[in-house]
Image (cartoon, coloured by chain):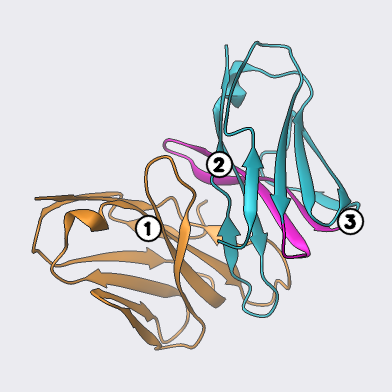
């Protein structure tokens, strides 16, 4: 399972509040990703990181920010949550060489 | 425009039937992966194909990469209820270096006992 954990696994929050989701990996992979998954849209990339302090935007980055201060942790922050950000969020790592991605168990976020 | 088109979107079959799902693109891929996702869980990698024409088997699942590396198929023989789930294909477009993988929207399979 590539040693990926996500926390929290479930969260309910109110519109306008800040929320931070954490992804933790234990195998020192360089690349880490944040996706959201919604019915009818599939997996959509929010942000990704290619090293400590090195991040880039994905296709749905508006309203989200990320930080990676150490190899093992990749944080996703919703500065001011909106109902449109209700979704299931997945973190993934990518192995070098075969370029395979492995996903975490997901965080279900509900914004009321 | 979706770079990877999966078909069908939904498939409901009886236990014991065979099925094929497809992943198509106009782009050439360096590699292509297939994932299965069950409700409440993250996608789980099933296989990676890298060579045009490559065929890989995983028990009752057969994966094929097109000769031109623009498409792939997943064939399931004698489907079982445990095969139920969302099947996703994803790939690295050739020549794009370490850009993120491109994902299809998936085929949702339901196998009825």
Tag of residue B6: 1
Characterize the local packing of mark 3: few (<14), some (14-19) or many (20 or more) Cα atoms within 10 angstroms: some
Mark 3 chain: A
- The residue that label 3 is drawn on is A52
Q: Are marks 2 and 1 in contact (CB under 8 Å)?
A: no
Residues marked 2 and 1, same chain? no
Measure the C-alpha gap from mark 2 to mark 1. Answer: 23 Å
- The residue that label 2 is drawn on is A106
Chain B rendered in what hue? Answer: orange
Measure the C-alpha gap from mark 3 to mark 1. Answer: 34 Å
Left or right, A82 with reference to B104: right
Residues marked 3 and 1, same chain? no
Chain A rendered in what hue? Answer: cyan
Q: Is residue A18 visible?
A: yes
Task: Say whether residue A35 is magenta.
Answer: yes
Q: Is residue B25 visible?
A: no
Q: How many marks?
A: 3
Q: For the residues carrying marks 3 and 1, which lies nearer the camera in this image?
A: 3
- The magenta stretch is A26-52
């Amino acid at each position: 399972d590539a040693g990926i954990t996500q926390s929290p696994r479930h969260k309910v929050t109110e519109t306008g509040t800040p929320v931070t989701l954490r992804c933790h990996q234990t195998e020192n992979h360089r690349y880490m990703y944040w996706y959201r998954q919604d019915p009818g849209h599939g997996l959509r990339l929010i942000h990704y990181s290619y090293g400590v302090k090195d991040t880039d935007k994905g296709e749905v980055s508006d309203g989200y920010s990320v930080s990676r201060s150490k190899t093992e942790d990749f944080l996703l922050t919703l500065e001011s949550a909106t109902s449109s950000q209700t979704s299931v969020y997945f973190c993934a790592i990518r192995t070098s060489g075969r370029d395979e991605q492995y996903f975490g168990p997901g965080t279900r976020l509900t914004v009321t | 425009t979706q770079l990877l088109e999966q078909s069908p979107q939904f498939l409901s079959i009886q236990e014991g039937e065979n099925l094929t799902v497809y992943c198509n693109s106009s782009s050439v891929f360096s590699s292509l992966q297939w994932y299965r996702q069950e409700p409440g869980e993250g996608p789980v990698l099933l296989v990676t194909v890298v060579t045009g024409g490559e065929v890989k088997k995983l028990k009752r699942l057969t994966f094929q990469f097109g000769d031109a590396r623009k498409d792939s198929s997943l064939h399931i023989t004698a489907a079982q209820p445990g095969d139920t789930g969302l099947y996703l294909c994803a790939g690295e477009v050739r020549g794009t270096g370490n850009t993120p993988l491109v994902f299809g929207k998936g085929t949702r399979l339901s196998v009825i006992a």
